[in-house]
Image (cartoon, rainbow, N blue to C red):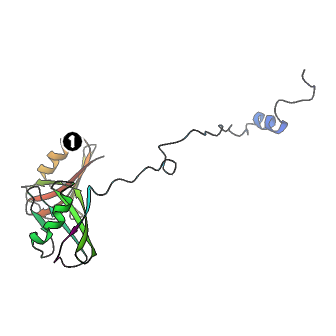
Amino acid sequence: MRLPFRRERPLHERLAEQGGLAPARTQPLDTRPRWGEVGIHGVHRQREWDAVATADAPGLPGARLEFVSLPDGTLLVDEDIPDDALAPLADAVEEETAPPYRAEAVRQHEDVWAVAARRIEVVRVEDEVDGDRLELAVAEGERTFLVDGRPAFGSVPALERLAAERFEDYVVRGERLEDELWEVAVTPL
């Protein structure tokens, strides 16, 4: 039995709806877990290192150093440090990852060093390049080419071929390691 003065909805809601001012009906609270959202599930950061180790490396100067291992195992370092002094650090990370890689080492205590390595791609570029850093972006047929951060004309065919084999639109970043050897990263757009 329905009472004669009982309304389905309050008067103010009906009047607002008739006047076109009705608020949007809200969805009920979704209590299902959102496993893909940051903060709820804890989506992790991208992994920064492929290998992390400690090594005993006597005779190394300073508190921090960086080096690159080429595909043939040659070690490149900016400081005047012999390869045999770096060998304990390289051997430690090469238990988990193979060359080529870029590594950073930090002195922990006296001759004990922590060393971390990230795999890199090394390419031989025989084209003449007047700079040490390159960035080539290709998107929808438009090209942007930077050498040492400044716009440049021309191109580096070896890097363009490398990127075009993988993606249609891409960014190629390159850093000269030594002479014709470049560390490159190809990213899709």
Residue 162 % position (x, y): 16, 46
Look at the numbered disc 1 and give the secondary structure of its residue.
loop
Residue extent of the magenta highlight: 55-61
Q: Nearer the viewer, residue 22 or 125?
A: 125
Image-quadrant location for residue 47: bottom left
The image quarter in which residue 51 lies: bottom left
Q: Across the whole image, how many numbered discs are drawn on residues?
A: 1
Q: Does the magenta run of residues contain 131?
A: no
Height in image: 11 above or below 50? above
Is 105 located above or below residue 33 in the figure? Answer: below
Estimate the x, y position of residue 108 in percent, counting from the top left.
29, 73
Q: Amino acid at mark 1?
A: Arg
Please state if 101 lies on the left or on the right of 46 as rendered: left
**Up/down of 82 relative to 132, above or below:** below
Q: Residue at x 14, y 63 (%)?
A: 177
Q: Residue at x 64, y 40 (%)?
A: 29
Mark 1, residue position = 166
Q: Residue furthest top?
A: 1
Residue 152 visible: no
Q: Who is closer to the viewer here, 183 or 110?
A: 110
Q: Where, by quadrant of the figure, is residue 169 drawn?
A: top left
